[in-house]
Image: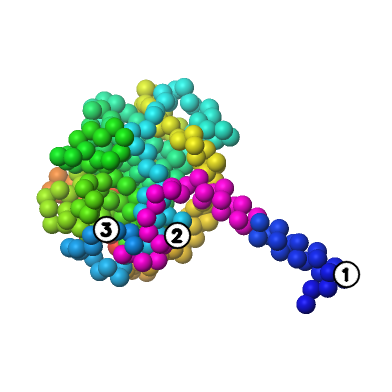
Amino acid sequence: MLDFRGGGWVLLLAVLISIGVVVWRVLTVWGPLTTAHAIGDGRNIATYQFTLAPATIPLDQLIPAGAWLRRDGMPTLDFPETRLGAEVDDQYLVPRRKLLHSDRVIGVVINGEARAYPIWVMTWHEIANDTVGDEAICVTYAPLSDGAVVFRRPETEQAGVAPGGDGHITFGISGLVYNSSPLIYDRVNAGSESLWSPLARKALIGPAVGSERNLDVLPSALTTWGVWLAAYPNTTVVAPDPARSRVYKRDAYSEYFGEERLRFPVEPLPPTGSRGLKSRVVATRQDDGTWVVDDADRVDALDLSRPRVWCFWFAWFAIGGR
């Protein structure tokens, strides 16, 4: 029992301060991330209100990402504003956050138009529904798998729900994880949405399963801003959301990237000794439709001649090569 006359109040005050710090960190980091219309309880996949049939994967391998990242719990970048790369070089994009030459970016060039998507922006959105070179595209980045995939947004008779709907499907955050990599969903008529894996390049659950509407993956680069800007000096770069400037300054995955431990179950795992689980690899589509995997540091990151998928080795082994 605490004796307040003997100094027990000091211990109690320390505990209260510690609790306050934890609450403050949650509110400042995750508060700006979550959205008011998020769906799902963080535990039961049925609460996410997706049609779970047909399914090409066992539903017991479908896991909620948690209470902090539910369906639509993170805002996607829908037709984001851009800046000329030469004008933002080493300048603040949001308060106290510059775009440094060493920052990683996802780069695309479509019909002669170059655009970069900083990883420190994509980490807090994971999806960018965009139009580049008059092509409707979706850029996805999954920190859990370090997965970067760019594909054409399929046409639809009813435009997606995002502002600026352009006759092509837009994609949203499902809040559900498969093999430690998030699934995305197509924004179509309520009750008709499907769950897609960018790494698998197709729908895994829902009405789109078995259709011919697989994801048409595009060439992309995963490189540093300095390398990209030197190669494409006229590039544009996606601007961050000013309303979420606080989260961009935080690196929520530095510890995760520095260890082999995974946050969610993965089945199957690569054979021991093949590569490290989090070795960075790139899969390149060949003319015959097959995909060839190599270590990311052994390829020319700026080679945009073929479609590519970038990710950790464990994720390609479990999902990409399926």
Measure the alpha-carbon separation of dots 1 and 2: 41 Å
- Say whether residue 108 is magenta: no
Residue 153 in the image: state x and y as whole percent: 23, 40
**How far is mark 2 from mark 3, CA to CA?**
17 Å
Q: What span is colored magenta in the figure?
A: 21-46
Expressed as whole percent of the image width and height from the top left, the position of residue 321 reads 24, 58
* Marks 2 and 3 in Cβ contact (< 8 Å): no
Q: Amino acid at mark 1?
A: Arg
How crowded pointer 3 is (Cα within 10 Å; few <14, some 14-19, many 20+) is rated as: some
Where is residue 104, by image quadrant? top left
Q: Which residue is mark 1?
A: 5
Q: Secondary structure at mark 2?
A: loop
> Regarding mark 1 in the picture, which secondary structure is present there?
helix
Residue sitting nearer the eye, 66 or 197: 66
Point out residue 51 in the picture as x, y percentages from the top left corner.
23, 60
From the image, tell me which residue sits under label 3.
50
**Residue 125 versus residue 289: which sits nearer the camera?**
125
Q: Nearer the viewer, residue 290 or 208?
A: 208
Residue, far bottom? 1
Question: Which class describes the residues within 10 Å of circle 1: few (<14), some (14-19), or many (20+)?
Answer: few
Asked whether the viewer can see residue 218, the reply is no
For the view shown, which residue lies furthest in the right direction? 5
What amino acid does circle 2 point to? Ala
